[in-house]
Image (tube, rainbow, N blue to C red):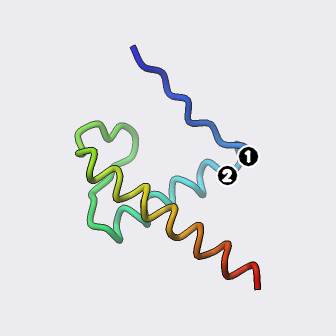
Amino acid sequence: MSSNNNQLNVPEAREAMERFKMECANEVGVNLKEGYNGDITARQAGSVGGMMVKKMIESYEKNMK
């Protein structure tokens, strides 16, 4: 049995992270729904996560200037 170890450092950010995830999924063409998304492929999930990381790095780099 697996357990979910995904924890936010700032629990108040959960809603913003969900919106961010949905936005990234939309950009890469993955149809996420509220709640459980176990029916998507690993490739689709990876593309959403990859887009999230890419956007976070871009944001960080912009703020470094």
**Which class describes the residues within 10 Å of circle 2: few (<14), some (14-19), or many (20+)?**
few
Tell me the residue that label 2 is attached to. 13
Vertical comparison of 27 with 19: above or below = below
**Which class describes the residues within 10 Å of circle 1: few (<14), some (14-19), or many (20+)?**
few
Vertical comparison of 44 with 55: above or below = above
Tell me the residue that label 1 is attached to. 10
Q: Nearer the viewer, residue 15 or 24?
A: 24
Q: CA distance from mark 1 to mark 2?
A: 6 Å
Find residue 38 and report its image quarter. Answer: top left
Q: Residue shown at 36%/37% (left/top)?
A: 36
Q: Nearer the viewer, residue 16 or 54?
A: 54
Q: Dots 1 and 2: beta carbons under 8 Å? A: yes
Dot label at residue 59: none
User: Residue 31 location in percent, x, y?
Assistant: 27, 57
Q: Amino acid at mark 1?
A: Val
Residue occupying the far top of the picture? 1
